[in-house]
């Protein structure tokens, strides 16, 4: 019965107790036996548990006996909790009719809470506000309830106050889901229309698509069509999540479940795509689908050259589960063979780096992240580059356009000046501000993505003692006065240290980078010049001093010409050594760009 189904999700800022609340619900509905219970059941990756943030969306069906004595099926769609996975969150929200808005009683409303709330309101979801962690001594339950009342207009006495860890009032949340969230609509006898809100790769069943069925029904006999990729398949298995995979015969309108497609790569079965019947299906896909577009790019190189093939295999396996990861081969004079990888954001890059090291035991070097620039050439052509080393000669370039973001920062009012100074230093511009509560301010900025990805979040957190939170999304490409900053070590350009910077910052960044490299590059028996080069000239230089050998130690007494002769001989030897000498650049040097602001 479709009237007994409720599809909902939980939206919250990182570490506000979303996964803990999901755990309590699973326990209270008997979906998971107490003996099988672990913390953060739906966060299956070790990384998710350590970082306290959901990286991969998941879903689970719970049976709940409501106060009216009827049995209800509650489908919880767990969403990723980080701004990098914003698109996946929007798809998961579109698969629901309602959302629990969970706010930490000690932290209050934060940027990510608001960002996901606006996405939920755009999707016309019923919002149920919930204040969590009311058992803590530092909880400011009344103040947070007032903020939620001002934000949503919900009467204060109807805002649920719970402690997910203790299980306090969680039964009221389950009852509110049944009472307030409308049942799904849809007809079983219409052509099939199902939304893929996530997927993962299974070595036995192929790609397992997580779907919400809007109309029609799915059985194992149905030939299915993925509408954006035009791939046809016959399901290997269909079922629902409990939270492990439970096969059933039919998924009907309103249901949330999975289709084991048998497909070999996640890219054939993309998040946001519409599944329909291969014959007699719907003509138009569900709205909102777009391909995941990488925003941040970095080079990944094995520390040992012979590990190149292993690194390619590891990236291919990661891509099976994560279609938003892109990579292509790249060579660097300094680091040899590697790959240019595209990520959704800096957090996504960090996750991939950790997974490569932990799951595949790879020892890799990541170059400093960069963004994708649009280049307009003098001859009217345009091209996109994701690596600064790929920038054409300056004489051929008409304009360089860089991506700009809409940035929202949520902070206590006492850190207003700190935030303003940080954003201004990073070339951001102020747009608007508002005060959702007396002691908190929400400030809107526009800022270049290249400034945002390097160290911005760390500086924001340290400058505001961890109280500020931020959210950002792509706005547009804008022409800027940008130049290529190259670093020459011993007269040779090091492509992995090349950066694209604003013309006004080129001198300072070049000088800072040269000073940092002077400390990091080990001394040789000859002097090594380190130079920063931009706009056809050297803008900064430092020398890594030579290790000296005292050739005069055995020359005591006698004529001065003997000493001069020995020094001249040494000078010739050093010159020859410099011509054939190979300067080893340590790994720290490639991340020096990231730490320029700290020097």
Image (cartoon, rainbow, N blue to C red):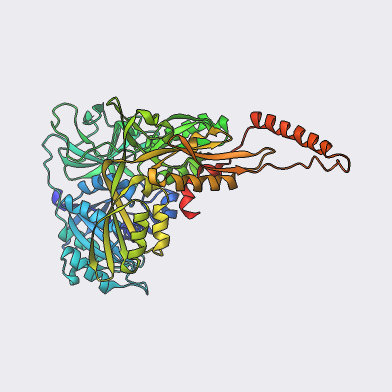
> Seen in the image, is 313 located left or right of residue 185?
right
Depth check, front residue: 95 or 391: 391
Residue 293 in sight: yes
Q: In which quarter of the image is residue 278?
A: top left
Residue 4 drawn at (x, y percent): 16, 52
Is residue 105 in view from this perspective?
A: no
Q: Quadrant of the rendered structure where residue 211 is?
A: top left
Q: Nearer the viewer, residue 75 or 594?
A: 594
As drawn, 388 above or below 461: above
Q: Which residue reaches farthest top?
A: 379
Q: Is residue 494 left or right of residue 559?
A: left
**In the image, residue 430 lies at what x, y percent?**
27, 56
Q: Position of residue 204 (x, y in %)?
A: 39, 33
The residue depicted at 87 percent of the width and 43 percent of the height is 556
Position of residue 196 relative to residue 428, above or below, is above
Would you place residue 349 above or below residue 330 in this image?
Answer: below
Position of residue 208 measured from the top left corner of the image (x, y, whole percent): 32, 37
Q: Is residue 41 above or below residue 486?
A: below
Q: Give whichever of 500, 456 is nearer the camera.
A: 500
């Amino acid at each position: 019965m479709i009237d007994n189904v409720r599809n909902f999700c939980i939206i919250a800022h990182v570490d506000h107790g979303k996964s803990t609340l999901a755990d309590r619900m699973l326990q209270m509905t008997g979906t998971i036996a107490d003996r099988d219970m672990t913390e953060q059941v739906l966060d299956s990756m070790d990384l998710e548990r350590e970082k306290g943030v959901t990286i991969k969306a998941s879903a689970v069906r719970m049976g709940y006996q409501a106060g009216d004595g009827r049995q209800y099926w509650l489908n919880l769609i767990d969403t990723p909790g980080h701004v990098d996975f914003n698109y996946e969150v929007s798809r998961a929200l579109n698969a629901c009719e309602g959302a629990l808005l969970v706010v930490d009683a000690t932290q209050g409303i934060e940027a990510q809470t608001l960002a996901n709330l606006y996405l939920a309101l755009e999707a016309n979801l019923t919002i149920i506000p919930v204040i969590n962690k009311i058992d803590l001594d530092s909880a400011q339950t009344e103040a947070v309830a007032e903020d939620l009342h001002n934000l949503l207009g919900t009467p204060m006495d109807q805002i649920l106050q719970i402690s997910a860890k203790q299980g306090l009032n969680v039964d009221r949340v389950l009852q509110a889901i049944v009472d307030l969230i409308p049942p799904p609509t849809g007809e079983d006898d219409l052509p099939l229309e199902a939304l893929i809100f996530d997927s993962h790769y299974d070595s036995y069943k192929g790609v397992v698509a997580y779907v919400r069925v809007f109309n029609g029904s799915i059985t194992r006999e149905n030939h299915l069509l993925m509408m954006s990729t035009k791939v046809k398949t016959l399901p290997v298995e269909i079922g629902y999540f409990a939270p492990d995979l439970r096969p059933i015969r039919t998924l009907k309108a309103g249901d949330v479940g999975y289709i084991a497609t048998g497909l070999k790569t996640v890219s054939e079965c993309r998040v946001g795509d519409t599944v329909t019947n291969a014959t007699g299906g719907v003509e138009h896909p569900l709205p909102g689908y777009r391909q995941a577009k990488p925003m941040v790019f970095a080079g990944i190189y094995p520390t040992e050259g012979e590990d190149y093939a292993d690194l390619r295999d590891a990236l291919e396996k990661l891509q099976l589960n994560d279609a938003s990861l892109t990579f292509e081969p790249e060579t660097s004079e300094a680091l040899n063979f590697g790959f240019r990888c595209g990520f959704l954001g800096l957090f996504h890059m960090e996750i991939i780096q950790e997974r490569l090291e932990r799951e595949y035991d790879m020892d890799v070097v990541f170059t400093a992240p960069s963004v994708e620039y649009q280049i307009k050439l003098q001859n009217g052509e345009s091209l996109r580059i994701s690596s600064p080393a790929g920038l054409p000669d300056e004489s051929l370039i008409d304009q360089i356009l860089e991506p700009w973001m809409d940035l929202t920062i949520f902070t206590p009012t006492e850190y207003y000046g700190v935030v303003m100074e940080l954003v201004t230093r990073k070339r951001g511009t102020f747009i608007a501000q508002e005060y959702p509560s007396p002691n908190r301010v929400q400030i809107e900025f526009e800022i270049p993505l290249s400034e945002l990805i390097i160290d911005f979040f760390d500086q924001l957190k340290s400058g505001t003692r961890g109280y500020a939170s931020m959210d950002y999304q792509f706005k547009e490409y804008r022409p800027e006065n940008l130049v290529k900053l190259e670093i020459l070590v011993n007269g040779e350009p090091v492509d992995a240290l090349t950066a694209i910077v604003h013309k006004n910052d080129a001198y300072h960044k070049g000088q800072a980078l040269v000073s940092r490299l002077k400390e990091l590059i080990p001394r040789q028996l000859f002097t090594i010049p380190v130079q920063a080069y931009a706009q056809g000239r050297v803008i900064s230089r430092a020398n890594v001093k030579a290790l000296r050998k005292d050739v005069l130690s055995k020359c005591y007494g006698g004529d001065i010409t003997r000493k001069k002769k020995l020094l001249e001989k040494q000078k010739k030897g050093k010159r020859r050594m410099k011509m054939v000498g190979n300067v080893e650049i340590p790994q720290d040097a490639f991340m020096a760009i990231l730490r320029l602001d700290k020097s």
